[in-house]
Image (spheres, rainbow, N blue to C red):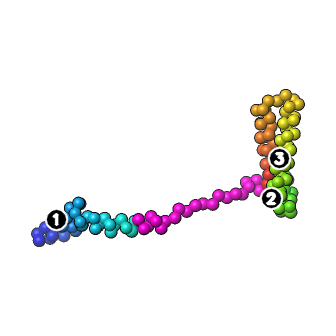
Amino acid sequence: MAAASLSANLGTSFYGGWGSSISGEDYHTMLAKTTAPRQQAKLSRKPIRVQPMMKNVNEGKGLFAPLVVVTRDIVGKKRFNQLRGKAIALHSQVITEFCKSIGADAKQRQGLIRLAKKNGERLGFLA
């Protein structure tokens, strides 16, 4: 009784008895009560995924961008991308033939193709 009044006066948060131990039944009961809500909370949480934004950064930029956007709207995205792919492949072939005719190596050819892509972006062909 003196211990109870002593702990009340000291303001401690000890509420258990001295007879209960970590390996006792009281510990396992307490552990089951405290872990069950946590396990349910873990199961109910779903990770939030951010959907990637598949938008062209060059949309509306460049001299030819409005023409490209109107053409894409008229012929449809699928057909437009097919035509764009064919045009890019044809342009790459022209660059390759040019490099062969002047004797440029593969590294210079890749540099010219990258330059053509950059110019196409700036002019709005990739809008």
Distance from disc 1 to disc 3, alpha carbons, whole Å, reads 82 Å
Residue at left 55%, top 62%? 48
Q: Residues within 10 Å of mark 3 (few under 14, many from 20)?
A: some
Which residue is depicted at the point 63% across and 60% down?
51
Label whose residue precedes the other's in the sequence (2 or 3): 2
Secondary structure at numbered mark 1: loop
Amino acid, disc 1: Gly
| Residue 35: quarter of image | bottom left
Whether residue 44 appears in magenta in the rendering, the answer is: yes
Give how far apart the Cα atoms at labels 1 and 2 are. Answer: 76 Å
Kind of residue at disc 3: Ile
- Which residue is at the front of the view, 120 or 94? 94
Q: Which residue is mark 2?
A: 78
Q: Which mark is drawn over residue 19?
A: 1
Q: Nearer the viewer, mark 2 or mark 3?
A: 2
Q: Main secondary structure of the magenta part?
A: loop
